[in-house]
Image (spheres, rainbow, N blue to C red):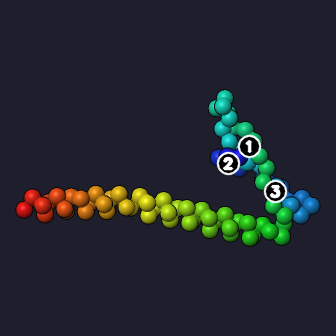
Amino acid sequence: MIIEGIGNATFVNGVLRIQTLAVNPAGNVAESGVVEIPGNKIAEVINLLATAAQGISDKIESNSDKPKSEAKEKKINKKTKKK
């Protein structure tokens, strides 16, 4: 299931239900599923999602920094070799 947005959310009978949205092949926003979280687990699930997202963000950031620093090292090495 892909989640590109959130539709409606309800809390009934101790369960949080979140409608997830995505763009369908016709280019329209449509429901892609429903996330159902027991009421006593809402905080835990949200914290775990936030932690996972932060970890992924950190990895992406560290990977995007490597090529920049490697490129700088290559430029420095080329300059020192010419001398």
Of the residues under marks 1 and 2, which one precedes in the sequence?
Answer: 2
Question: Horizontal and vertical percent for residue 77?
Answer: 19, 62
37 or 68, which is in the foreground? 68
Would you place residue 28 above or below residue 81 in this image?
above
Q: Identify which amino acid the numbered label 1 is placed on.
A: Ser
Q: Secondary structure at mark 1?
A: strand
- Disc 2 target residue: 3
Q: Identify which amino acid the numbered label 3 is placed on.
A: Glu
Q: Identify which amino acid the numbered label 2 is placed on.
A: Ile
Q: Residues within 10 Å of mark 3 (few under 14, many from 20)?
A: some
**Residue contact at pointers 1 and 2, CB within 8 angstroms:** yes
8 or 23, which is in the foreground? 23
Q: Residues within 10 Å of mark 2 (few under 14, many from 20)?
A: some
Give left or right: position of 27 versus 69. Answer: right
Question: Horizontal and vertical percent for residue 35?
Answer: 78, 54
Give left or right: position of 35 versus 47. Answer: right
Question: Horizontal and vertical percent for residue 40?
Answer: 83, 70
What is the residue that sits farthest to the right in this orientation?
A: 13
Would you place residue 34 above or below residue 61 in this image?
above
What is the residue that sits farthest to the top in this orientation?
A: 26
Numbered badge on residue 32:
1
- Disc 3 target residue: 36
Give left or right: position of 71 versus 53. Answer: left
**Residue contact at pointers 3 and 2, CB within 8 angstroms:** no
Would you place residue 70 above or below residue 28 in this image?
below
For residue 36, say whether it is visible.
yes
How far apart are the two marked residues, 3 and 1, measured between alpha carbons? 13 Å
Q: Residue at x 50, y 65 (%)?
A: 58
How far apart are the two marked residues, 1 and 2, measured between alpha carbons? 7 Å
Q: Residue at x 92, y 61 (%)?
A: 13
Of the residues under marks 3 and 2, which one precedes in the sequence?
Answer: 2
Q: Secondary structure at mark 2?
A: loop
